[in-house]
């Protein structure tokens, strides 16, 4: 059995504890954690996993719906999914008529995807392919793909790994192609957002709320089917500015946005709720409290 990157005894009581655990790690140093258990139980949630196995990866989920809509897949287009995991995006884009390739550096991920591929009819099989490879060096010629997906991968790789992968993605993307990115959570919500919201809660209730990362950790500890060390795979969570800077630095022009504003007044219709909503927008607090970072990028001319 491979040695665990964080040892056997893991305990976190604050976000600072979490940051100490992930400091200095890369996707390479954590590769052993991307095992069969991770892809069977930790990707998304248990319902997502059940849906995957029942539909052979063809059922659209909250993780695939918007990215595939943004890609505007056309029949015959060549698609690359970097960090494909179990292969949902590959199967779903192939089902739309694309010729889709999924790559992942985890043998467990590719094994899952290949087994699922074998369950499909020839129509899907003929348009799908999976390769176990590190995305920092892609064995494809320049300008091969019409669409490239990088979904829920950015936060799992170090800054240096991210920049290398983005440059490779730019190289193999066609001039008029699209790179679609999703990353969550927004790291500013973990830091500035938590403290601003926490201070408000403290003043209101006299008690500071538990940090979401600590809540996640406690939930993992209580579930015998899950493993606590899988919590520490997010080593490079992004903000809107950091994501934009990464794309610009790697020769990509892009639109980057947050899907969910995190506005606590969004559902209120009373006078103070309307004022609070407008003030939240005016102050740009979406950048601090919002979640689900999306980006659509293309090579600079």
Image (cartoon, rainbow, N blue to C red):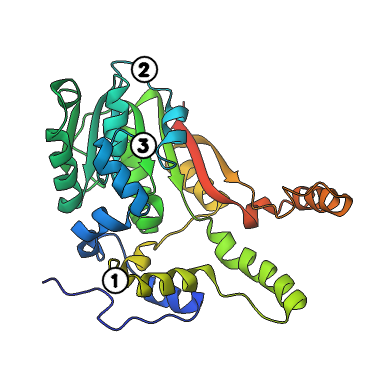
SS state under label 2: loop
Reading the chain from its start, which is encountered first: label 2 or label 3? 2
The image quarter containing residue 36 is bottom left
Q: On screen, 175 above or below 281?
A: above
Residue 143 shows in the view: no
Residue at the spot of label 1: 224
Q: On screen, 261 above or below 9?
A: above
Residue depicted at x 17% and y 53%: 108
Residue depicted at x 19% and y 41%: 113
Residue 157 relative to residue 215: left or right: left
Image x and y of residue 98, in percent: 29, 22
Q: What is the count of numbered marks? A: 3
Reading the chain from its start, which is encountered first: label 2 or label 1? 2
Residue at mark 2 to residue at mark 3: CA–CA distance: 15 Å
Q: Return the residue found at the far right.
A: 271
Residue 107 shows in the view: yes
Residue at the spot of label 2: 74
The image quarter containing residue 151 is top left
Q: Residues within 10 Å of mark 3 (few under 14, many from 20)?
A: many
Residues marked 2 and 1 touching at CB (< 8 Å): no
Residue depicted at x 57% and y 42%: 257
Residue depicted at x 24% and y 64%: 33
Q: Which label sits on residue 149? A: 3
Residue at mark 2 to residue at mark 1: CA–CA distance: 43 Å
Of 119 and 84, nearer the camera is: 119
Q: Nearer the viewer, mark 3 or mark 1?
A: 1
Image x and y of residue 72, in percent: 43, 23
């Amino acid at each position: 059995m491979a040695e665990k990157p964080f040892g056997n005894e893991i305990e976190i009581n604050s976000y600072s504890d979490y940051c100490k655990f992930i400091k200095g790690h890369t996707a390479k140093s954590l590769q052993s954690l991307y095992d069969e258990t991770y892809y069977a139980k930790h990707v998304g949630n248990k319902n997502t996993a059940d849906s995957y196995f029942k539909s052979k990866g063809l059922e659209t989920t909250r993780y695939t719906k918007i990215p595939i809509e943004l890609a505007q897949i056309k029949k015959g287009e060549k698609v690359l999914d970097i960090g494909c995991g179990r292969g949902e995006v590959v199967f779903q884009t192939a089902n739309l008529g694309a010729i889709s390739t999924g790559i992942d550096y985890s043998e467990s991920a590719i094994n899952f995807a290949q087994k699922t591929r074998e369950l499909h009819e020839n129509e899907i099989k003929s348009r799908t392919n999976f390769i176990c490879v590190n995305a920092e060096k892609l064995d494809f010629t320049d300008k091969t793909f019409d669409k490239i997906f990088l979904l829920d991968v950015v936060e799992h790789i170090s800054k240096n790994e991210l920049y290398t992968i983005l440059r490779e993605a730019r190289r193999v993307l066609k001039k008029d192609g699209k790179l679609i990115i999703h990353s969550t959570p927004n790291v500013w919500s973990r830091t500035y957002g938590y403290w601003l919201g926490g201070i408000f809660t403290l003043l209101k209730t006299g008690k500071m709320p538990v940090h979401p990362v600590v809540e996640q950790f406690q939930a993992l500890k209580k579930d015998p089917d899950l493993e606590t060390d899988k919590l520490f795979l997010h080593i490079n969570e992004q903000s809107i500015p950091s994501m934009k800077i990464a794309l610009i630095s790697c020769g990509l022009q892009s639109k980057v946005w947050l899907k969910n504003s995190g506005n606590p007044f969004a559902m209120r219709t009373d006078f103070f709720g309307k004022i609070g909503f407008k003030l939240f927008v005016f102050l740009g607090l979406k950048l601090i409290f919002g979640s689900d970072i999306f980006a659509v990028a293309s090579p600079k001319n």
